Image (cartoon, grey):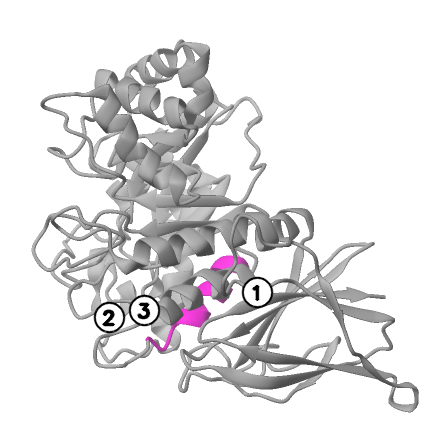
């Protein structure tokens, strides 16, 4: 998940230029075509983990290991991704069966990371191997098959021809052979190009993406999406640093993914583990990384990470390196419950049709120039410059997801709409939300100005990073 050594892994095996990529796309290399249409469909908002609850693979104890998995279930996660490295997880078929048994026992979904195909960018695709993998999992007992959400193929394939060929080949084969299940590939963040990581070559390491760097990243994104035709576009982006700095391309990355999914859902990855020069995330940081992607229409969030990776430089996540719960466990538990009960059902039911920023706060964000971020056919004005609003609308419903982009509290946020509305309703807040809390939206006062054909309402306060759903009765 973390590009810890940006710039150190680029090799001579880079994708050479645009013409080469377009040629590869046009001839399709020898990637098998998908002959049957996928039956997989995302039915619920996904709340997943990277570096799942640990199990003892040397001495399996079903009671203890299922209790470990239950830690994720009790925090209202619904998906484990099986992404730990060798030594913390058994990537054999038997190991995957055992993990599926644990997941089934506690009511979780699970992405298998079978070593025959996992980290598929390193392995030339093989039809015989793919057939055997699909056969092995399609023949699982029904309970284990139900727990299997799909296959995690790889994390952050590079901007290289061999990675593209291998990943697209495995993806196409497994999708064809087991169309009921998701095949997930997690793509690299936009700041990869700035440091010339993984085959990029136009970076200048100044922390700001110029036009050439943006073009390279967009080519990377379009190339993988065109070749994979993924059911979900997943990516990670960690914006906060210990010194208080904030990445300049965070909202650019959200926007460019949102606009290039080719109608697939997209998932984002909030950072919950302190590591390297990144911040040890506070509640406000984590709220921000949950709610901003949702404003852009994300239908899944997979936190990085549940347990901290064992490598040097990783500090605490929801648990520390000694296996003790940290404060972040309860923070994320409450966020997961809130999203699953209040925000997620709206996002899954009502399409995201637009994004509005009251200003380019945080400063110096890439990609706002020439965009429609700062104008809207619905929103006339917002009183606080730190506000982001995601618009969700279908023929019957209209929602605004209002997010505070600051880690400090904002108060008395006045939002003026370019229309007359009958009523405005506010969803309950994430603050103090629990399983027994009301899910009911409360009506608030609306100030209608017929001569201006406008309506205004006020949100009393939003804590740092907080998002709140607003229902507009038309």
Q: Residues within 10 Å of mark 2 (few under 14, many from 20)?
A: many
Q: Which circle's residue, 3 or 1, is located before the other in the chain? A: 3
Identify the magenta region: 247-258
Q: Mark 3 to mark 2: distance in Å?
A: 8 Å
Please state the horizontal and vertical placement of residue 315, each as a whole percent of the image.
Answer: 15, 59
Q: Position of residue 196 (x, y in %)?
A: 21, 65
Q: Which residue is mark 1?
A: 429
Q: Residue at x 36, y 27 (%)?
A: 103
| Quarter of image, res 41 | top right
- Local SS, label 2: loop
- Regarding residue 173, the answer to whether it shows in the image is no
- The disc at residue 229 is none
The quadrant in which residue 76 appears is top left
The answer to whether 455 appears left or right of 81 in the picture is right
Residue annotated with mark 2: 279
Q: Look at the image and tell me in which quarter the C terminus lies.
A: bottom right
- Marks 2 and 1, how far apart at CA: 25 Å
For the residue pair 124 and 267, the one nearer the viewer reads as: 267
Give the x, y percent position of residue 278.
Answer: 22, 69
Name the foreground residue: 415 vs 219: 415
Kindly report the distance in space between the C-alpha atoms of the residues bearing marks 3 and 1.
18 Å
**Outermost residue, right direction?**
451
> Residue at image x 27%, y 40%?
52
**Residue 149 located left or right of residue 415:** left
Confirm whether the magenta stretch covers residue 91.
Answer: no
Circle 3 residues within 10 Å: few <14, some 14–19, many ≥20: some
Q: Secondary structure at mark 3?
A: loop
Q: Within the image, what quadrant is residue 188 found in?
A: bottom left
Sequence-first tag of 2 and 1: 2
The tag on residue 282 is 3
Above-or-below relation of 11 to 149? below
Looking at the image, residue 48 lies above or below residue 414 = above
């Amino acid at each position: 998940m973390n590009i810890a050594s940006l710039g150190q892994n680029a090799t001579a095996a880079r994708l050479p230029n645009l013409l080469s990529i377009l040629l590869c796309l046009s001839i399709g290399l020898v990637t098998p075509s998908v002959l049957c249409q996928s039956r997989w469909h995302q039915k619920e908002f996904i709340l997943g983990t990277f570096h799942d609850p640990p199990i003892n693979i040397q001495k399996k104890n079903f009671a203890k290991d299922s209790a470990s998995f239950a830690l994720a279930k009790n925090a209202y996660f619904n998906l484990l991704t099986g992404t730990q490295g060798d030594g913390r997880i058994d990537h054999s078929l038997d190991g995957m069966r055992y993990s599926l048994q644990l997941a089934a026992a506690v009511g979780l979904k699970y992405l298998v990371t079978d070593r025959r195909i996992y980290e598929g960018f390193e392995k030339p695709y093989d039809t015989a191997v793919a057939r055997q993998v699909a056969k092995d999992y399609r023949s699982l007992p029904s309970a284990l098959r139900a727990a299997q959400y799909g296959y995690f193929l790889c994390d952050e394939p590079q901007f290289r021809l061999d990675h593209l060929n291998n990943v697209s080949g495995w993806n196409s084969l497994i999708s064809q052979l087991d169309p009921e299940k998701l095949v997930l590939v997690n793509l690299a963040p936009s700041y990869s190009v700035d440091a010339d990581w993984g085959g990029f070559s136009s970076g200048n390491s100044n922390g700001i993406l110029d036009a050439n760097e943006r073009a390279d990243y967009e080519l990377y994104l379009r190339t993988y999406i065109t070749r994979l035709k993924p059911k979900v576009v997943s990516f990670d982006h960690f914006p906060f640093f210990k010194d208080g700095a904030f990445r300049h391309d965070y909202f650019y990355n959200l926007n460019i993914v949102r606009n290039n999914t080719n109608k697939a859902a997209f998932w984002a990855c909030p950072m919950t583990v302190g590591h390297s020069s990144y911040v040890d995330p506070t509640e406000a940081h984590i709220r921000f990384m949950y709610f901003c992607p949702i404003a852009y229409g994300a239908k899944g969030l997979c936190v990085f990470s549940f347990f901290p990776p064992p490598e040097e430089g990783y500090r605490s996540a929801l648990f520390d390196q000694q296996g003790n719960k940290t404060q972040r466990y309860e923070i994320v538990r409450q966020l997961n419950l809130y999203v699953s009960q209040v925000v997620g059902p709206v996002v899954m039911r009502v399409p995201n049709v637009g994004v509005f920023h009251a200003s380019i706060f945080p400063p110096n964000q890439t990609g706002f120039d020439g965009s429609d971020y700062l104008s809207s056919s619905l929103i006339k004005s917002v009183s606080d410059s730190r506000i982001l609003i995601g618009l969700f609308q279908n023929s019957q419903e209209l929602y605004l997801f209002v997010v505070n982009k600051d880690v400090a509290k904002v108060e008395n946020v006045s939002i003026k709409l370019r229309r007359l509305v009958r009523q405005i309703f506010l969803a309950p807040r994430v603050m103090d939300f629990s399983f027994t809390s009301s899910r009911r939206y409360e009506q608030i006062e609306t100030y209608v100005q017929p001569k201006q054909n406008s309506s205004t309402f006020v949100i009393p306060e939003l804590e740092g990073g907080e998002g709140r759903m607003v229902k507009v009765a038309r």
